[in-house]
Image: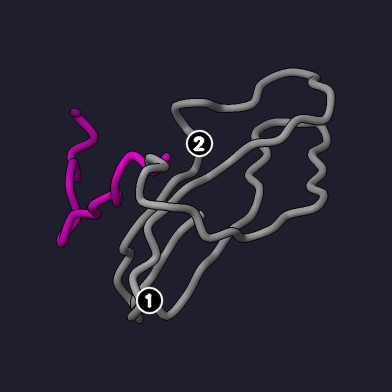
Amino acid sequence: MRIDKETTQLAFDNMENRAIKGTTDWQKYDVVLDVPKDATGIFFGILLSETGEVWISNASFEVVGSDVPTSGAGVPRMPVEPTNLSFED
């Protein structure tokens, strides 16, 4: 899930540090991000690596208290110019 304000990412969580792997039964997964009042977009989806199937059901948005910790690892910062053009790193 990603929270944007115009073209700027404000919050991000792709569950990279808690990826779902292999065959699993239906389970509930939560993504918790702070959404500022001036946010202009909330985006969510599923990323499937390699082969297989993935399903989503009963997706919802809920307001939670500030006592619930966010799940995001922060906003990924993209370089402002190309890097490692020699392919040595």
What's the residue type where badge 2 is placed? Met
In the rendered structure, which segment of residues is drawn in magenta? 70-89
What's the residue type where badge 1 is placed? Ala
Q: Earlier in the sequence, mark 2 or mark 1?
A: 2
Residue bearing mark 2 = 15
What is the magenta segment's predominant secondary structure? loop
Q: Residue 86 is drawn in which quadrant?
A: top left
User: Residue 12: horizontal and vertical position, in percent?
Assistant: 40, 52
Q: Residue at x 47, y 48 (%)?
A: 32
Taking depth in this image into account, of 36 and 83 the one nearest to the observer is 36
Label disc, if present, on residue 39 of the rendered structure = 1
Residue 62, placed above or below residue 76: below
What is the basis of the colouring in this image?
Answer: one colour
Q: Residue at x 24, y 54 (%)?
A: 78
Residue 63, placed above or below residue 51: below
Q: Residue at x 29, y 71 (%)?
A: 8
Label disc, if present, on residue 47 of the rendered structure = none
Is residue 86 found inside the magenta-colored segment of the image? yes
* Distance Cα–Cα, label 2 vs label 1: 21 Å
Asked whether, in this view, residue 59 is left or right of residue 72, the answer is right
